[in-house]
Amino acid sequence: MDFKKISNEELNLRLEKLARSERKLTHVILLHINEVDSRDLHLGHPH
């Protein structure tokens, strides 16, 4: 990706959008980890 062709404003907007997406994805991942933990799936057997 050639960032030199992107304006400062566009670069900031993209970064903000990516950060929001990352936070949403992290939240969903943590919800799944919590569910895996509550089912003891990390122990290798079903709950």
Image: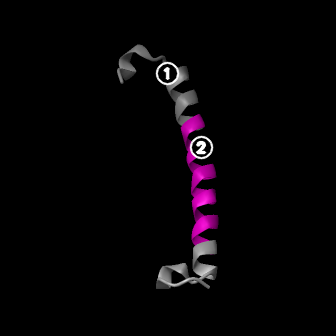
| Cα separation between marks 1 and 2 | 20 Å
Which residue appears farthest toward the top when viewing the image?
A: 5
Q: Is residue 7 left or right of residue 2?
A: right
Q: What crowding class fits label 1: few (fewer than 14 Cα within 10 Å), some (14-19), or many (20 or more)?
A: few
Residue 41 locus on image (x, y percent): 54, 79
Disc number lying in front (1 or 2): 2
| 46 is higher (above) or lower (below) than 8 | below
Circle 2 SS class: helix
Magenta region includes residue 23 = yes
Location of mark 1 (residue): 8
Check the picture and name the quadrant holding the N terminus.
Answer: top left
- Which residue position holds label 2? 21
Magenta stretch: residue 31 in it?
A: yes
Quarter where residue 37 is shown: bottom right
Do callouts 1 and 2 mark residues in contact (Cβ within 8 Å)? Answer: no
Q: Earlier in the sequence, mark 1 or mark 2?
A: 1
Q: Left or right of 34: which side holds 1?
A: left
The spot of residue 25 in percent (x, y) is: 59, 51
